[in-house]
Amino acid sequence: MEVIRLPALSDNYIFLLHDAGNSRAAVVDPAQAGPVIKCLEAIKAELVAIFNTHHHGDHVGGNLDLMARFPDLTVYGGREDKGRIPGQSVFLEQGSRLNFALRTIEVIFVPGHTRAHIAYYFPPTDTGVGELFCGDTLFSGGCGRLFEGTPAQMLDSLGKLKALPDETRVWCAHEYTLKNLHFALTVEPDNLALEQYYTRAKSDRSLDLPTIPSSIGLEKQINPFLRSDQPTIQKSVNSTDAVQVLGRLRGKRDVF
């Protein structure tokens, strides 16, 4: 399975999953239909599925146009998003399993950014690493705003993702990395891995190169929202309570 990253809107990523052997494709969080259709025409593949992580317009905006173009495709989303995702016909929850391109997909329920957010995890195969499509729950160097959820929910959700193998590639849905890392350095200024990653990310972005995918192993080293148990992080927000640490971090990031 090939993952094709499609930039959209101002800073979104749409991910096209290409099953070349069968000339089929699925798409994760199509903010717009145009980039998806253009790519499908170029690779000569038929779209069979939309995997939505949550209901926000910059993740589902292309659903209906894609359904009009490919009337037989299936739209997947979280069970708690019923009525909020255009065209949704399959309602998923923690532990649901799917298959695409001879790969198993495990659904992880990750509320916090929204009450119904899910992530799609492709466990590693004998020839490759795992793939995580986490929408707006986990970003490189950050996490999503708490629009509908609580700090406790987000902490639990991030804990589920943190427990995945370090090699797992993290396909988050926005190019927020530079600002996230700038904020992270205000929280943990002596983190050498963070400083090095920030330097590399600045170089990549200066060349208009993406910082996505990241990896779980990297995020565990540099992402303050995965490091709430670290004394340096706790000191920065004056708390040792994990839920309070995450809530205060998110509050500081909201106004950064």
Image (cartoon, rainbow, N blue to C red):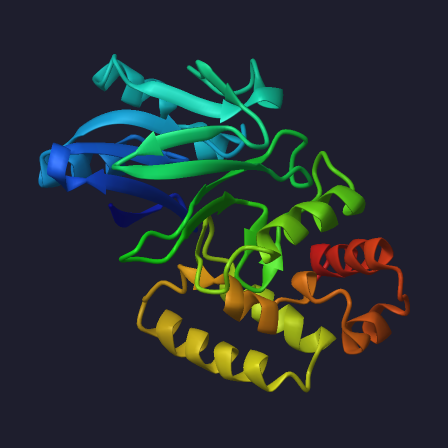
Name the one closer to the observer, 60 or 16. 16
Q: Quarter of the image holding residue 194?
A: bottom right
Q: Quarter of the image holding residue 46?
A: top left
Question: Looking at the image, is 16 positioned above or below residue 26?
Answer: below
Q: Which residue is drawn at 73% across and 50% down?
A: 155
Question: Looking at the image, is 140 positioned above or below residue 124?
Answer: below
Question: Looking at the image, is 79 positioned above or below residue 11?
Answer: above
List x then y, in percent, for residue 50: 36, 28
Q: Which residue is drawn at 55% across and 19% down?
A: 84
Q: Residue at x 39, y 21 (%)?
A: 75
Task: Report the quarter where the C terminus lies.
Answer: bottom right
Task: Report the quarter where the N terminus lies.
Answer: top left
Q: Is residue 34 left or right of residue 200?
A: left
List x then y, in percent, for residue 182: 60, 72
Name the one closer to the observer, 123 or 162. 123
Q: Quarter of the image holding residue 48?
A: top left
List x then y, in percent, for residue 40: 17, 35
Q: In this view, does 108 lie to the left or right of 250?
A: left
Question: Looking at the image, is 58 positioned above or below residue 171?
Answer: above
Q: Residue at x 74, y 42 (%)?
A: 153
List x then y, in percent, for residue 204: 36, 73
Q: Is residue 42 left or right of residue 145?
A: left
